Image (cartoon, rainbow, N blue to C red):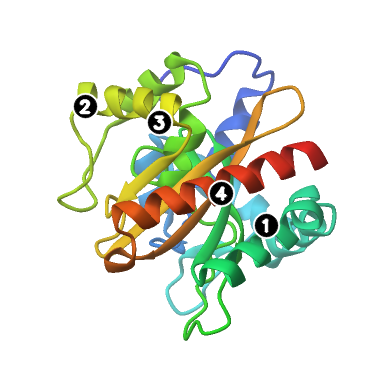
Amino acid sequence: MEPNDNFPEGVKVKSLYKAVKLLDYFDSQHPERGVSELAELSGMLKSSVYNIMSTYEICGIIEKNPKTNKYRLGLKILALSNVLSQDDVFWEIIRPYMEELSEQTGETVFLATPYGNNIIYREAAFPNHSISVRAIKGVVAPMYCTSLGKAILSCMDKEQTERVIAEGLEPFTPYTITDPQAFRDEVEKIRIQGYSIDNMEHEYGIKCVGVPIKNGNGQVIGGISLSGPSLRFNDEQIAEYAKILTDRAIRIRDRI
């Protein structure tokens, strides 16, 4: 028998919920998964996982790599994401501000929205001199060690901070804040000053400054950040970037 699961409030079809959650185990570090892996990660029976994957395969949501015999996301996911992109208010309204910011500062601009206890990157704007362009759209990252995540979290209720802490503050670099009380203090500091700093907490050598984006009702809907090599982000530059980002966030709020 499969283990009893604690389902979120409001879930009507538990079997469907468990099937959809299997898709969460596919990410940039694990683009392919086998049935045994998925069964171990989810706590489901191998036969149940196989049946779900086979059904997904028929629907085009999942496909099997004939060389590895493992599953990966199918083209149906890409088709659906294209529909989402074409009807994305963030692209239409925020993209021009992102491009303006990147041109003005010479740094990379990221846009993200909340995604459970994480964030999901929605768009990026790169300076003209950028040698490499990072594919970021759709990438999921932790709230606790990114400037965007911390900026967004500072505008949410304190219970959300506790949920993030309960999930674990795993270190990505030596600078990642892993002490629960230190992290609570960090979120409160951001709440007061209005912007956050990723001091090489997610990627070594990279600093970011982020601010939340709110709608006309004062609800946080995402965040926007400037990111670049740590050597360019001294205290004076961070303060200047925070002012610029805050100004754009207000303009975006007024547009939305």
Q: Amino acid at mark 2?
A: Ala
The crowding category of the residue bearing disc 1, from other C-alpha atoms within 10 Å (few below 14, some 14 to 19, many at least 20), is many
Q: Residue tagged by mark 3?
A: 190
Q: Residue tagged by mark 2?
A: 182
| 163 versus 19 height, above or below | above
For discs 1 and 3, the disc positioned in front in the rendered view: 3
Q: Residue at x 27, y 50 (%)?
A: 201
For discs 1 and 2, the disc positioned in front in the rendered view: 2
Labels 1 and 2: the sequence-earlier one: 1
Q: Quadrant of the C terminus?
A: top right
Residue 150, image x, y percentages: 42, 36
* Residue 61 circle label: 1
Q: Residue tagged by mark 4?
A: 245
Q: Are marks 2 and 3 in contact (CB under 8 Å)?
A: no
Residue nearest the viewer, comparing 110 with 122: 110
Labels 2 and 3: the sequence-earlier one: 2
Q: Residue at x 33, y 43 (%)?
A: 145
- Callout 3: SS: helix
Q: Are marks 1 and 2 in contact (CB under 8 Å)?
A: no
The crowding category of the residue bearing disc 3, from other C-alpha atoms within 10 Å (few below 14, some 14 to 19, many at least 20), is many
Q: Amino acid at mark 3?
A: Ile
Residue nearest the viewer, comparing 227 with 157: 227
